[in-house]
Image: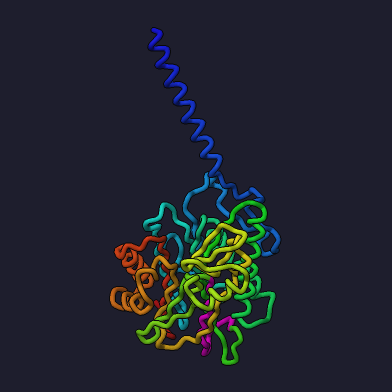
Amino acid sequence: MVGADVHTVAIALLVTVMFAALERLWHRHRFRADNPKYQSKSHPILAAADMLSSRDPVESPDAKSQAVTTAAGPSTNGALNQHSAAPYGYEVGVAHDRGQRRTMEDAYSFIVDFGNVRGQGYFAIFDGHAGKHAAEWCGQNFHKLFLGNLAEHNEPIPDILNRTFHAVDKELSDIAAQGATHSGCTAVTAFLRLEDAEGKPVKDPHGPCRRVLYTANAGDARGVLCRGGKAVRLTYDHKGSDKQEAKRIVDAGGFVLNNRVNGKRSPCVLAVTRSLGDSAMKEFVVGSPYTTETELSEDDEFVILACDGLWDVADDQAAVDIVRKAAPNSAQDAAKTLLEHALSSFSMDNVSVLVVRFLPVGASK
């Protein structure tokens, strides 16, 4: 009997310890959207922004993406992905996988009829590091600040994108100051706008318009345009291996070792020299984006936005060739094909790919 009692006590003690450990783990990973330390309310556009759904009281290890559209069409990953209105239609495809990593730290976002203007579009990939929160926050909030800046400032779009990147970077720094997260993310964003001959936005496209694609990036998330079958890079890789970026880091008081950024007062090291977030490295790793402005022509077939999980195993032209050969008529098939290529090529990172296929002017699908 004594032996049985000892055995019972031992089992009870083991169960108690296990439940206590699980409870500590649950509390450690709990993430509530209504907890103010996970939100920054300093910008009026974000007054109603929620980090995560209140239906999910336990924090998921993977970043959530919020693809928002207003157009009717087929569904991709739970989001309507096609703008079919002639004459300035386009199609969006998205594919992503955590790859060899334990968690998914990438987020994406796209908005059809952005700003309630037919034919406009917003597209973005955010590649997180040191945690998912910066990328996830950007995926759910970047477009709100951008849309607000479009309404508030009569400036060229590249200047508005630059303003938005800096505003987002400040928001993430404010969140970090509250102790919520110290993660960061690289970013590539694209804004498709219809304009008249003078470069002014067209609200209701019935007559002739120019289609202009504006891009901005910080870090090594990349955008590549297919023009007549040739790859045209629209972004700039901000990495420690780049001589200009390395010089900027050194001039700011940091140093680059083995192509990684090191700070004198911070033990953090990063392979990228520009990002959103990363508050501990902000004096060196800035959020200033590289911007481009491209008027689209009939030769422009599609644009690829992707994180370095793709570009580590495929150069620009290879990615364009893969799409044109395997999926020339479907943005979703194109995104999936590029994802499969990255995974089969043993990419070691999260992989997120967004493809926008431009429908010929006057056509609808």
Between 341 and 121, the residue placed more toward the observer is 341
Q: Quadrant of residue 82?
A: bottom left
Q: Is residue 166 magenta?
A: no
Residue 264 seen anywhere in this rendered image of the structure:
yes
- The residue lying toward the viewer, choosing from 87 and 185, is 185
> Which scheme is used to colour this image of the protein?
rainbow
Q: Tell me the residue at 65%/64% (across/down).
A: 170
The one of 344 and 256 positioned closer to us in this rendering = 256
Toward the top, the furthest residue is 1
As drawn, 1 above or below 24: above
Q: Is residue 91 left or right of residue 117?
A: left
Q: Residue at x 55, y 77 (%)?
A: 290
Q: Quadrant of residue 274?
A: bottom right
**How many numbered marks have been drawn onto this rendered protein structure?**
0
Name the residue furthest bottom.
Answer: 197
Which residue occupies the foreground of this view, 141 or 208? 141
> In the image, residue 344 lies at what x, y percent?
29, 63
Side of 4 relative to 240 (left or right):
left
Horizontally, is 307 left or right of 38 in the view?
left
Q: Which quarter of the image is occupied by the N terminus?
A: top left
Which stretch appears magenta? Answer: 202-218
What's the residue at 55%, 72% (across, down)? 114
Question: Which residue lies at the image location 61% right of the left edge and 75% below the top edge?
Answer: 162
Relative height, residue 17 to residue 60 (above, below): above
Question: Can you see residue 110?
Answer: no
